[in-house]
Image: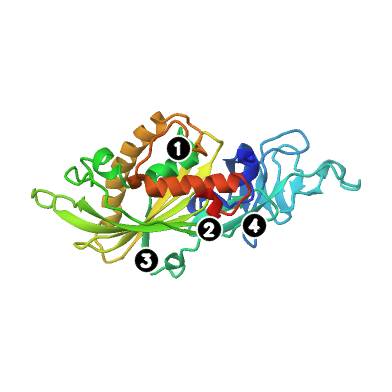
Amino acid sequence: MPRPYEEALAAFWHPVAFSRELNERPLAFRLLGVDGVVWRTASGVAATQRYCAHRGADLCDGEPVGEGLRCAFHGWTYGVDGGCVRVPSQLSAPISQKARLAAYRCAERYGLIWVCLSATPSAPLPEWPELEDGALATVALPLLDWDVSAGRMMEIVLDVAHLSWVHRGTFGNPEQQEVPAYDVERHASGLRTRIVYPALGPSIGGAPPRVDKTTLTYDVTLPFSVRLEFKPTLFYTHTVYAVAQPLSEEKMRCFYFCSYHPKIRNFGEMFVKSELAILEQDRRIAEGQRPKAHPLGFDGEVHVKADRLPIEYRRAMAALRLGQAPDDPRME
């Protein structure tokens, strides 16, 4: 039997905020049904449960101090390990061992704040080395809150066959409906594939859109991260990163951003406008799918070869829920 959703995914890193959102004040997050709070410390970032162990006050109203996070209600202060280190109303008395919050692993990378609810992560953060040295420019979309599971969102991002149908009017090419055969590489941390798609480029100067044979390289890091490189023949390469935060089994928030060559003028503004239109097309489809939770099997669905990538993703997620390796040959 598959493990419960929250249990199976608690040991993975998940994004909970863009770095730019977390300033001098604590920030709330919800992850796999858990309400937490993140804040900046002198040495990095920290995360604990959201509500004070004393009287249930919201620690988002508190204040980061040298000792940790101080509650705004009575000044109780919690260290990064979740233990209470100061009770102002009785400074000379021992602090109860029960005065403790659940503490979570927390890290900052790629402009995101990541949280792992387990003390021991089962996998590292995604590896995107091109983002490490600051040579590329980046632009992010507003947070995407979809009424759909994180797995459903991943499947529509990975779906090759829908491009010419759902994305008509943006970059989809309605003249290219058939999907050529492609292979999917399975590995311990995810999936990889590459296809060539005759995308419609933007209309320039009122001229009709031009067909551009764009190489799409999909790199999936389980459970909910995908790096999608677009390599057109007419323009510079750009890379999209979509990382879902599973709020619950049926709701998610997506952190969606892009890296690109800094010489591309006005790319950020154009990308945000066009990508929001593309993702709105996806959202309408994804929110209408049933069941809302991400299926682990294929009962009630009929698939074809063009569905290879989302099928392999679903198999990998089923393996995780069953406690097996994502590239386990038994999941064929």
Distance of mark 3 from mark 2, alpha carbons? 25 Å
Q: For mark 2, what is the residue?
A: 189
Q: Are marks 2 and 4 in contact (CB under 8 Å)?
A: no
Viewer-nearest of labels 3 and 2?
Answer: 2
Residue 60 visible from this viewpoint: no
Viewer-nearest of labels 2 and 4?
Answer: 2
Note whether 188 is above or below 167 in the view shown: below
Q: Are marks 3 and 2 in contact (CB under 8 Å)?
A: no
| Few, some or many residues within 10 Å of mark 2 (<14, 14–19, 20+) | some
Q: For mark 4, what is the residue?
A: 41
| Dot 4 or dot 1, earlier in sequence | 4
Label 4 element class: loop
Label 3 element class: loop
Q: Percent from the top left, x then y, of residue 50?
A: 66, 40
Q: Percent from the top left, x then y, of residue 156?
A: 38, 42
| Dot 2 or dot 4, earlier in sequence | 4
Of 39 and 10, nearer the camera is 10
Note whether 313 is above or below 296 in the view shown: below
| Few, some or many residues within 10 Å of mark 3 (<14, 14–19, 20+) | some
Q: Quadrant of residue 71?
A: top right
| Dot 3 or dot 2, earlier in sequence | 3
Quadrant where the image shows the N terminus: top right
Residue type at the position of mark 3 = Leu
Most extreme residue toward the right is 93
Q: Are marks 2 and 1 in contact (CB under 8 Å)?
A: no
Residue type at the position of mark 2 = Ser
Q: For mark 1, what is the residue?
A: 145
Distance of mark 4 from mark 1, alpha carbons? 28 Å
| Few, some or many residues within 10 Å of mark 1 (<14, 14–19, 20+) | some
